[in-house]
Image (tube, rainbow, N blue to C red):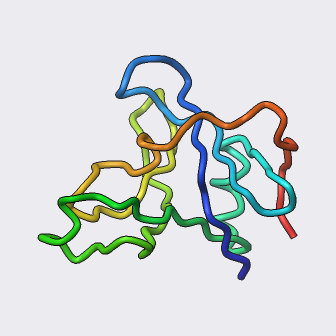
Amino acid sequence: MARYEVTHATPDGPDYGRRIDMIGGPDFGGWRMRTEDAIHLIKMGFTSFYVRALNNPFAAQNALRFGSTVEVVVRPGGLLSGEYLTTIADGIETNNLRSLPPCPLIHRLVTSLP
């Protein structure tokens, strides 16, 4: 199974509780992927994604340290919202994807990764 770092996440709007629409990373000169495509790849067991921990001052009191990783996982949504991407709880951020900058439009839009 291939594993890729996620360094960008674009929400569907300015509201903090909104769904992540797109994730992206630095591999292959920069890529971005729709959430639905990422969910499909994760569920099929082809790909996994992770977020690298930032240098967070609260990390020392938690198990997470600078440079360690947090897995991106699929969670069931509500009746109308469908499945969504989030990260495994690390005691610092509810969803680490929300702390990432938006995906640059210059990154190549992909539906899968090698």
What number of labels is visible?
0
Q: Nearer the viewer, residue 93 or 26?
A: 26
Residue placed at 60% from the left, 57% from the top? 6
Q: Residue furthest bottom?
A: 1
Using the image, determine if residue 63 lies above or below residue 111. Answer: below
47 and 16: which one is in front?
16
At 47% from the left and 68% from the top, the residue drawn is 71
What x and y, as percent, mark residue 97?
Answer: 46, 47
Q: Is residue 111 above or below residue 91?
A: above
- Which quadrant does the C terminus fall into? bottom right
- Looking at the picture, how far across and down is residue 40, in whole percent? 69, 56
Q: Is residue 103 left or right of residue 50?
A: right
Residue 107 left/right relative to 16: right
Q: Of 36 and 12, which appears nearest the observer?
A: 12
Residue beneath the point at 71% across and 82% down: 1
Question: Residue at coordinates 45% horizontally, 72% vertically from top-left?
Answer: 69
Residue 109: x, y in percent?
85, 42
Relative vertical location of residue 64 with respect to residue 29 in this rendering, above or below: below
Quarter of image, res 58: bottom left
Q: Is residue 25 left or right of residue 91?
A: right
Quarter assignment of residue 44 = bottom right
Q: Residue furthest top?
A: 14
Where residue 2 appears, as percent x and y from the top left, is 73, 78
